[in-house]
Image (cartoon, rainbow, N blue to C red):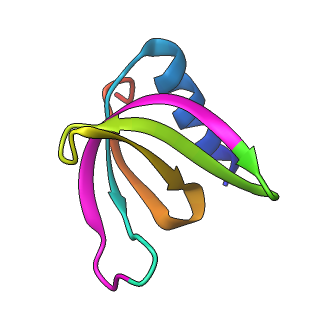
Amino acid sequence: PPELLTQLRAAIADEQPLTLDYTPPNCAEPRRHTVEPLRLEQRHQLTYLVAYSYRAEATLTLRLDRLHLLSSSSNP
């Protein structure tokens, strides 16, 4: 959705952490992550968020249609 892209772009520009739920492939339950968003990427007509996850202690590539944004420090 356009509003999700707007929120993600703002968080990337402002270097603001995000809290999100992400449902990996072949997994029924989403996993909650607090991430530092780094960039958005387009691959084969899909959009991905590349972000550092504190939970995973690694940089993850998250498909946008599998994530649900819960909070952003830039949101009121």
- Nearer-the-camera pick, 26 or 32: 26
Classify residue 72 as left or right of residue 13: left
Horizontal and vertical percent position of residue 58: 29, 39
Residue at the far front: name it. Answer: 58
Q: How many marks?
A: 0
Residue at the far right: name it. Answer: 45
In the displayed structure, 3 sits above or below 10; it is below
Q: Quadrant of residue 30?
A: bottom left
Horizontal and vertical percent position of residue 49: 54, 43
Q: Quadrant of the N terminus?
A: bottom right
Q: Give the range drawn in magenta.
A: 27-41
In the displayed structure, 46 sits above or below 58; it is below
In the displayed structure, 23 sits above or below 53; it is below
Q: Quadrant of residue 24?
A: bottom left
Q: Is residue 28 found inside the magenta-colored segment of the image? A: yes
* Residue drawn at the location 21% of the way across and 39% of the way down: 57
In the displayed structure, 64 sits above or below 24; it is above
Q: Quadrant of the C terminus?
A: top left
* Residue drawn at the location 32% of the way across and 28% of the way down: 17
Residue at the far top: name it. Answer: 14
Magenta stretch, main secondary structure class: strand
Q: Is residue 34 found inside the magenta-colored segment of the image? A: yes
* Residue drawn at the location 69% of the way across and 47% of the way down: 2
Horizontal and vertical percent position of residue 35: 31, 37
* Residue drawn at the location 59% of the way across and 28% of the way down: 9
Classify residue 68 as left or right of residue 49: left
